[in-house]
Image (cartoon, rainbow, N blue to C red):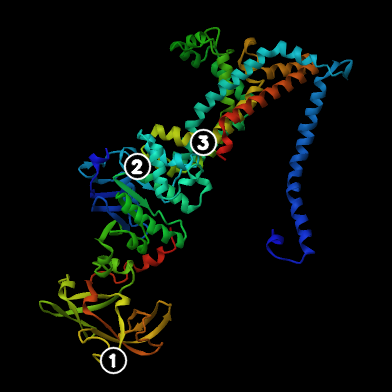
């Protein structure tokens, strides 16, 4: 920087410039190295694995067997569809729950703001697994939640919506979506909060001053300005939810199996590494496509 | 809608209290339709709170706000035919300039909103950047967009909250003139909140000086300057030399005053105070350096004081003197650079002024009220 501003001797300048140019790359290095070792290399190995044939016992050979993909997809496409559907539904629910909460925390909570933030993060002090198991207890057939749901005919409603197949809440689609919504809620709240906290209150006042009713103000000013937070939150929720393999296993039934669960069992129980790797790759591709379409549709690049 | 509600803006006993602090205290004010009105005062005097209550962004604790014959006290901001130019401009960053300007028109489903918005942008000479986003504009341009966005709605009252505060001095001077021209062009009622006395005097027809949540004086700029009614106004608007005086006698036209043993005169119509003790105020530029003897370069009717020049600083347009009077008080003298008498530091001088160029204030007031506020505020928001 100094070299540019001060008209120093010609001999000094190139040296300084060279030094300045290396700094960003040096800063990049640790993260880059980490990604190469723990992301690029495993991904390439996974790609190679998906195109091998053989078995765990007899060993695998690289055969460029693309048929694995066709077989895997034709067998497991319902699980893909289900995963996308469950993750999408859970994302919508988290957004509906998180937006008002994040708005309140960011704009109205005042001195309670920090306490509320701690409460949002507090569940992370317990293991993901324990928290999901806790939902088994909450939704269990002889628990008070089910009793209440039955008495207000909520279970009947779920049945008519095909979200459950019997008169209980546990081991239903409903339970899986509940678990996903619960587990990923903080990932929606935090980006929304970070965004809404920066919202300039005078813009809200300006909208009111320009004859916008509170509802119009929300849709014309608050919502569009919070889109970067919405996009960030939905991505942080949708992507891990689509690959989740815990909620469906602990809260669902055989009809709610998600693709993460399939990959998990293909790897660890059935030990068909080729199919597992192929499924992992397809899942990644599907998510990348969906996210790319979504981000493009949301048009957030204009807002940044 | 505009036709029905337009009229004078009236504040009746408006008070705003926060817990223990009274921001605005029993404010009664009539702002005539079509006038350029300034609310002037130091920071914390309640002027912005007053403006926010007119805009509907704050609710008065007590009192009423009327526009014409309509009580708008209990209406919400979006229901009022009042628009604000915010100090921070508050342009919507996600909308184009044109969409910013059409925002109010579209909420009211005004036909031809695009044409009207373009007209407003032409008025502020920014029609060519209608498609840009606020972030791409300079501060001065954003300020004009904020103005266009407000005036395009033809509100009954346009509120300006320190609109020029964020601009540099040169741009501020230019915008002052432009704002004034635009106001006379569109003929709307402008209520301009500012702490800058020069800005208020340059632009407004009428200025209300506020201090501590109360009105000090409401008058046109010349009256405020020439005939302030309180020491606060005398010191906050420009500078004043205040001399402790005692009334010795009054005739039908002239009052004889005693200032530390010197006989001075003041026209009776300038003397509203009935008390014996008072502050005699003279503006620095009204004082002239004159010869010691009567009839030198001024008529015999002038008041005279002698003193010693403590400091003389030449500013080009004028020379500013600090003159110590026999009783130790130091007063400011501004002598125009028009070839008239000058004096060096340490010189014995005689100061003269026409009796009608002075004013009298109640002696119970603090002679320094307002002087500090002005100094403090000059660099602030």
Q: Residues within 10 Å of mark 2 (few under 14, many from 20)?
A: many
Mark 2 or mark 1: name the one nearer the start of the chain. 2
* Quarter that holds the N terminus of chain B: top left
Q: Dot 1, how many residues are within 10 Å of its Cα: few (below 14), some (14-19), or many (20+)?
A: some
Q: Nearer the viewer, residue A242 or A301?
A: A301
Q: Position of residue A99 (x, y in %)?
A: 50, 31
Q: Which residue is mark 3?
A: A226
Horizontal placement of A79 versus B356: left or right?
A: right
Q: Where, quadrant-wise, is the C terminus of chain B in this rendering?
A: bottom left
Residue named by callout 1: B292
Q: Indicate which disc residue B153 carries.
A: 2
Gap between marks 2 and 3 measured at Cα: 27 Å
Displayed quadrant of residue A39: top right
B327 relative to B227, above or below: below
Residue A5 can be seen in this image: yes
Left or right: B126, with A130 as reference point: left
Are the residues flagged by discs 2 and 3 from a single subunit?
A: no
Q: Chain of mark 3?
A: A
Where does the image place residue A284, in percent across and percent down from the top left?
70, 24
x and y percent of residue A112 in the render?
A: 47, 40
In front of the other: label 2 or label 1? 2
CA distance for labels 3 and 1: 75 Å
Left or right: B318 as drawn, with respect to B286: right
Q: Are marks 3 and 1 on the same chain?
A: no
Look at the numbered disc 1 and give the secondary structure of its residue: loop
């Amino acid at each position: 920087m100094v070299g540019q501003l001060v008209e120093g001797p010609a001999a000094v300048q190139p040296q300084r410039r060279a030094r300045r140019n290396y700094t960003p790359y040096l800063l990049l290095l640790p993260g880059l190295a980490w990604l190469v070792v723990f992301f690029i290399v495993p991904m390439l190995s996974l790609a190679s694995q998906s195109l091998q044939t053989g078995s765990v016992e007899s060993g695998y050979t690289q055969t460029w067997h693309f048929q694995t993909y066709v077989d895997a997809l034709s067998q497991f496409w319902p699980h893909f569809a289900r995963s996308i559907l469950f993750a999408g539904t859970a994302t919508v629910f988290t957004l509906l729950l998180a937006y008002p909460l994040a708005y309140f925390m960011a704009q109205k909570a005042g001195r309670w703001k920090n306490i509320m933030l701690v409460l949002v993060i507090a569940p992370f002090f317990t293991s993901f697994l324990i928290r999901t198991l806790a939902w088994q207890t909450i939704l269990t057939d002889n628990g008070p939640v089910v009793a209440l749901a039955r008495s207000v005919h909520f279970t009947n409603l779920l049945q008519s919506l095909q979200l459950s197949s019997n008169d209980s809440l546990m081991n239903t689609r409903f339970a899986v979506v509940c678990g996903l919504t619960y587990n990923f809620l903080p990932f929606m709240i935090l980006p929304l909060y970070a965004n809404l906290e920066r919202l300039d209150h005078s813009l809200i006042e300006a909208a009111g001053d320009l004859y916008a009713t509170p509802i119009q103000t929300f849709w014309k000013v608050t919502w569009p300005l919070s889109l970067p937070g919405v996009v960030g939150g939905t991505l942080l929720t949708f992507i891990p939810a689509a690959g989740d393999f815990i909620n469906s296993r602990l809260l669902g039934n055989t009809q709610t199996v998600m693709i993460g669960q399939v990959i998990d069992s293909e790897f660890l129980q059935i030990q068909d590494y080729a199919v597992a790797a192929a499924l992992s790759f397809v899942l990644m591709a599907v998510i990348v496509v969906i996210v790319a379409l979504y981000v493009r549709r949301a048009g957030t690049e204009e807002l940044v | 809608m505009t036709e029905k509600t337009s009229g004078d803006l009236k504040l009746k006993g408006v008070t705003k209290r926060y817990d223990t602090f009274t921001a605005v205290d029993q404010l009664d004010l009539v702002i005539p339709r079509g006038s350029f009105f300034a609310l002037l005062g130091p920071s914390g005097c309640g002027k912005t709170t007053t403006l926010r209550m007119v805009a509907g962004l704050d609710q008065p604790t007590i009192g009423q706000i009327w526009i014409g014959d309509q009580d708008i006290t209990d209406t919400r901001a979006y229901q009022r035919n009042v628009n604000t130019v915010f100090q921070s401009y508050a342009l919507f960053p996600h909308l184009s300039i044109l969409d910013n300007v059409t925002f109010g028109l579209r909420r009211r489903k005004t036909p031809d909103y695009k044409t009207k918005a373009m007209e407003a942008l032409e008025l502020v000479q920014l029609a060519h950047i209608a498609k840009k986003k606020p972030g791409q504009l300079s501060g001065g341009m954003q300020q004009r967009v904020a103005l266009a966005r407000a005036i395009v709605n033809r509100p009954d009252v346009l509120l300006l909250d320190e609109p020029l505060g964020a601009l540099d001095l040169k741009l501020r001077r230019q915008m002052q003139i432009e704002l004034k021209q635009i106001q006379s062009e569109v003929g709307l009622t402008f209520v301009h909140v500012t702490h800058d006395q020069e800005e208020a005097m340059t632009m407004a027809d009428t200025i209300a000086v506020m201090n501590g949540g109360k009105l000090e004086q409401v008058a046109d700029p010349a009256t405020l300057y020439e005939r302030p009614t309180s020491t606060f106004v005398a010191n906050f608007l420009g500078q004043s030399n205040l001399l402790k005086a005692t009334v010795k006698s009054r005739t039908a036209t002239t009052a004889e005053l005693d200032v530390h043993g010197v006989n001075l005169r003041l026209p009776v119509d300038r003397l509203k105070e009935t008390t014996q003790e008072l502050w005699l105020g003279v503006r620095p530029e009204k004082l002239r350096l004159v010869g010691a003897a009567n009839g030198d370069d001024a008529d015999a009717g002038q008041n005279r004081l002698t003193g010693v020049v403590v400091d003389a600083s030449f500013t080009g347009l004028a020379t500013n003197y600090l003159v110590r009077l026999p009783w130790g008080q130091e007063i400011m003298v501004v002598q125009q650079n028009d070839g008239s008498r000058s004096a060096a530091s340490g010189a014995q001088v005689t100061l003269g002024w026409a009796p009608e160029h002075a004013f009298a204030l109640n002696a119970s007031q603090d002679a320094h009220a307002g002087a500090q506020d002005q100094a403090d505020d000059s660099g602030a928001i």
